[in-house]
């Protein structure tokens, strides 16, 4: 299991140092949550901040766009150093065109689905996707409870990816903790985003190691 700490729960006054800290603690990817106050009822930060953060780690930047019109900002996030860009299938942009913009920049494209959206919504695009992000909370805020009833979506995706002989990764985001990560692993998840479980822990390294160990012992 790969662990992508969500920087949404870090100390933003020392953002760069927080990235370096979770890098040393064994984070596989850095999950960066971008919110526009429109697609979700919260605001975070944008591409200029990501650009400044790029020097603090060589680990992949997993950029999760919770914004209404992602197509307008793909160039900015690519320039800033995003390795993976996820945007929501529920957004107002044309999905095919937005995927093309990401592909043209050599960035890995991913589609995210909110809890209320059936996973069928991403299937027409599956062959082009590096990853599918299945939300396990309503997007917008850290610290919410894991929705175990999203696991059938993961299982269905796993089967479809195998049937089509694709290498598409599956990520879940929201409420991942010691008591929930095994359910995600059993369902076939490749990457778990974890905000509170990493940044709320006294020792980030121990927290990441424990989350990984809980998946290995299944
Ligand atoms: C929620 C964000 C998540 C969030 C996860 O909209 O996409 O990445 O920070 O936080 P935890 O792990 O605390 O649920
Ligand atoms: Zn996220």
Image (cartoon, rainbow, N blue to C red):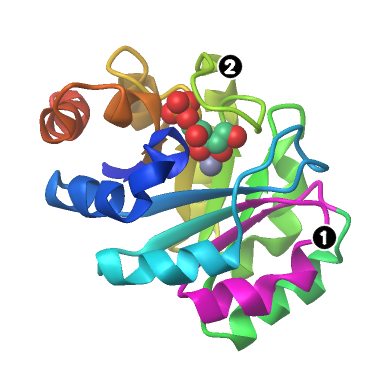
As drawn, 52 above or below 195: below
Q: Residue at coordinates 55% horizontally, 68% vertically from top-left?
A: 48
Residue 115 on image: x %, y %: 69, 28
Residue 6 visible in this rendered orientation of the protein = no
Q: Quadrant of residue 139?
A: top right
Q: Can the viewer see residue 183 in this picture?
A: yes
Q: Position of residue 20 (x, y in %)?
A: 22, 54
Query: Is disc 2 placed on a helix, strand or loop?
Result: helix
Q: Closer to the camera: disc 1 or disc 2?
A: 1
Mark 1 or mark 2: whose residue is earlier in sequence: 1
Q: Please say if 203 is above or below 53.
A: above
Q: Would residue 104 appear left or right of 174 to someone viewing this image?
A: right
Mark identifier at residue 149: 2
Tell whether position 72 is magenta: yes
Mark 1 to mark 2: distance in Å?
28 Å
Q: Determine which of the numbered discs, if any, sits on residue 69 in the image.
A: 1
> Which residue is the extreme one toward the bottom?
104
Quarter of the view holding residue 59: bottom left
User: Quick one: label 1, few (<14), some, or many (20+) residues within 10 Å?
Assistant: some
Relative horizontal placement of residue 28, taking residue 113 as reference (left or right): left
State the quadrant of the N terminus.
Answer: top left
Q: Is residue 174 above or below residue 148?
A: below
Residue 67 appears left or right of 208? right
The span picked out in magenta is: 65-91
């Amino acid at each position: 299991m790969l662990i992508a700490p969500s920087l949404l729960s870090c100390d933003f006054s020392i953002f760069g140092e927080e990235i370096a800290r979770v890098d040393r603690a064994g984070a596989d990817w850095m999950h960066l949550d971008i919110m526009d106050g429109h697609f979700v009822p919260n605001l975070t930060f944008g591409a200029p901040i990501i650009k400044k953060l790029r020097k603090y780690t060589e680990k992949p930047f997993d950029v999760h766009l919770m914004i209404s019109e992602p197509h307008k900002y793909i160039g900015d996030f690519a320039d800033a150093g995003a390795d993976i860009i996820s945007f929501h299938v529920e957004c107002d942009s044309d999905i095919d065109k937005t995927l093309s913009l990401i592909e043209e920049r050599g960035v890995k494209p991913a589609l995210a689905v909110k809890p209320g959206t059936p996973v069928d919504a991403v299937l027409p695009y599956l062959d082009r996707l590096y990853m599918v992000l299945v939300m396990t909370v309503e997007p917008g805020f850290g610290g919410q409870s894991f929705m175990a009833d999203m696991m059938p979506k993961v299982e269905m995706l796993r089967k479809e990816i195998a049937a089509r002989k694709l290498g598409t990764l599956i990520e879940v985001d929201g409420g991942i903790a010691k008591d929930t990560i095994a359910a995600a692993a059993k369902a076939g998840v490749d990457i778990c985003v974890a905000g509170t479980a990493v940044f709320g822990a006294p020792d980030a390294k121990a927290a990441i190691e424990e989350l990984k160990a809980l998946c290995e012992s299944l």
